[in-house]
Amino acid sequence: MTDSTDLGPEDRKIVTLARSVRARNGVPEGAAVRDETGRTYAAGTVALDSLKLSALQTAVAMAVAGGATSLEAAAIVSETVAPSAEDRAAVRDLGGPGTPVLLAGPDGTLRSTVSAG
C-alpha cells in the first residue's frame, strides 16, 4: 500500500475530495476527477430506482456537463479492490486510455493506480 501523502498535491486533492463526498453523503463510494484545466468534480454513488451510477461515472458526467473536454486523473474512495470495467471505460471515454485512476480505501490510503486503458 502507498500512503496518500506519497501522491502529488493535485492527486492528493482529488482523493481527499472523493473521501469527503463519501463520508458526507454516507454513500458506498466517493469519486473525483480533474479535467484538462485543473477543475475538479466530486460525486457520490447514485442509487435511485430509475438510475444507478457509480461515483466515478457520476463525476465524469458532471465534468462533461461542466464543459470538460479531457481528464488528467480520476480517484475513487471505496471498499472495492479494483476499479470496475465500467468506471475505467467512463474515464477512458473522456480522458483517454492513459488517464490514471487512483483507488483509495475509506481512510484515504492509496491501494492502487491503474490506467483507464
Image (tube, rainbow, N blue to C red):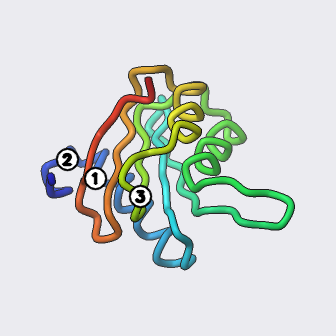
**Residue at left offset 43%, top offset 70%:** 20
**Crowd rating for badge 2 (residues with CA inside 10 Å; few <14, some 14–19, many 20+):** some
Name the side, left or right, on which 21 lies relative to 61.
left
Q: Amino acid at mark 2?
A: Leu
Q: Amino acid at mark 1?
A: Arg
Q: Of marks 2 and 3, which one's residue comes earlier in the chain?
A: 2
Name the side, left or right, on which 110 lies relative to 35.
left
Where in the figure is residue 81, as x and y percent of width and height?
36, 53
Q: Amino acid at mark 3?
A: Thr
**Residue at left offset 41%, top offset 58%:** 80
Residue matched to label 2: 7
**Crowd rating for badge 1 (residues with CA inside 10 Å; few <14, some 14–19, many 20+):** some
**Residue at left offset 46%, top offset 77%:** 23
Q: Nearer the viewer, mark 3 or mark 1?
A: 3
Where in the figure is residue 107, as x and y percent of width and height?
28, 71
Q: Nearer the viewer, mark 2 or mark 3?
A: 3
Of helix, strand and loop, which one carries label 3? loop
Name the side, left or right, on which 98 lies relative to 60.
left
Relative to 22, say whether 113 is above or below.
above
Relative to 21, say whether 3 is above or below.
above
User: Which numbered marker is on residue 12?
Assistant: 1
**Crowd rating for badge 3 (residues with CA inside 10 Å; few <14, some 14–19, many 20+):** some
Of helix, strand and loop, which one carries label 1? helix
Residue matched to label 3: 80
Q: Are marks 1 and 2 in contact (CB under 8 Å)?
A: yes
Where in the figure is residue 33, as x and y percent of width and height?
48, 44
How far apart are the two marked residues, 1 and 2, measured between alpha carbons?
A: 6 Å
Q: Of marks 1 and 2, which one's residue comes earlier in the chain?
A: 2
Name the side, left or right, on which 97 lies relative to 46.
left
Q: Are marks 2 and 3 in contact (CB under 8 Å)?
A: no
